[in-house]
Image (tube, rainbow, N blue to C red):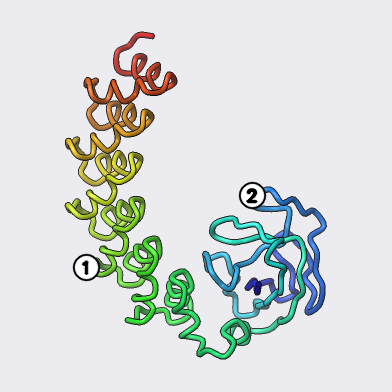
């Protein structure tokens, strides 16, 4: 696996770790637990959150060859115990190495996170190809609409609606109003149904309440912050877990 990463002009990472220009590199404090720190970090094949890269003009871009089996996935980046630095130089050189025989833009558009990052940091403007590629992933479709298009589009909204959280974020930050499609998508998850009711609809509805009631915690939270009163349905849902049954009784009935 090839890992994309950056260092400052002296090839030092934010914690002062000194990266070699080439050759073997190993973390002195390796811990395989899936949490940030205690390892070497980067983006697997350039996938993930590009804001974590150093975009200063004098930053050193590096490509590190790593054993796939040693990689720990942290969601928006990965960490690994050791690797072999095969490139240190500018951004374009790193991209060309990762792209291999492909055109860089073609390589970028094979992954939604890369497409969004390239649009934001390299193109610095929306384009049809990066938008289409970003829309393969709901999170990146929302981010593209919010930060690149800076306006709603049916295409990006439909892609965002494939994920409840992204649908909520699209409604709140991009549409800036409720819609049936974003609400229905948010209602596929109790947390985001509740959050949609609280921050987008700004009122209770039977559909968002019913979705929130699929989980005791969110049934209680809906009753407390959206309905602002007890109801048989939210009470019954909250009673599915002793912790939230107790919270419901204390906060909404004033008794243990």
Residue identifier under label 2 = 35
Quadrant of the image for the C terminus? top left
Q: 135 left or right of 58?
A: left
Residue on which disc 1 sits = 154
Q: Which of marks 2 and 1 is nearer the N terminus?
A: 2
| Horizontal arrangement in the rendering, residue 56 relative to residue 161 (left or right) | right
Circle 2 SS class: loop
Residue 25, position as x, y percentages in the image:
80, 69
Residue shown at the point (31%, 42%) measured from the top left: 195
Which sits in the foreground, 167 or 118?
167
**Label 1 element class:** helix
Crowding near the residue tagged with mark 1, few <14, some 14–19, many ≥20 C-alpha atoms within 10 Å: few
Q: Residue 6 falls in which quadrant of the image? A: bottom right
Q: Does residue 3 appear left or right of residue 51 in this picture?
A: right
Q: Which residue is drawn at 17% across and 35% down?
A: 206
Q: Is residue 35 left or right of residue 50?
A: right
- Answer with the quarter of the image where residue 54 lies: bottom right
Of residues 89 and 38, which is closer to you in this image? 38
Q: Which residue is drawn at 67% across and 77% down?
A: 63
Q: Residues within 10 Å of mark 2 (few under 14, many from 20)?
A: some
């Amino acid at each position: 696996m090839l890992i994309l990463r950056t260092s400052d002009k002296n090839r030092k990472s934010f914690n002062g770790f000194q990266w070699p220009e080439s050759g073997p590199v190993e973390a002195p404090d390796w811990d395989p637990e899936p949490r940030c720190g205690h390892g070497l970090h980067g983006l697997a094949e350039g996938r993930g959150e590009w804001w974590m890269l150093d975009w200063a003009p004098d930053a050193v871009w590096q490509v590190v060859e790593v054993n796939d089996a040693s990689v720990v996935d942290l969601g928006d980046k990965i960490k690994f115990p050791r690797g072999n630095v095969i490139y240190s130089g500018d951004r374009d050189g790193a991209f060309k190495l990762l792209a291999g025989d492909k055109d860089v833009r073609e390589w970028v558009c094979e992954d939604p996170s890369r497409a969004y990052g390239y649009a934001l940091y390299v193109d610095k403007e929306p384009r049809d190809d990066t938008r289409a590629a970003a829309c393969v992933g709901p999170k990146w479709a929302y981010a593209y609409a919010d930060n690149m298009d800076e306006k709603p589009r049916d295409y990006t909204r439909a892609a965002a609606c494939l994920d409840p959280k992204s649908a909520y974020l699209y409604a709140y930050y991009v549409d800036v109003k409720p819609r049936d499609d974003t609400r229905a998508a948010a209602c596929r998850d109790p947390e985001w149904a509740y959050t949609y009711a609280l921050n987008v609809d700004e009122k209770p509805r039977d559909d968002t309440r019913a979705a929130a009631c699929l989980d005791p915690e969110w049934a209680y939270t809906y009753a407390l912050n959206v309905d602002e009163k007890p109801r048989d349905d939210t009470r019954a849902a909250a009673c599915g877990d002793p912790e939230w049954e107790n919270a419901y009784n204390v906060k909404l009935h004033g008794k243990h």
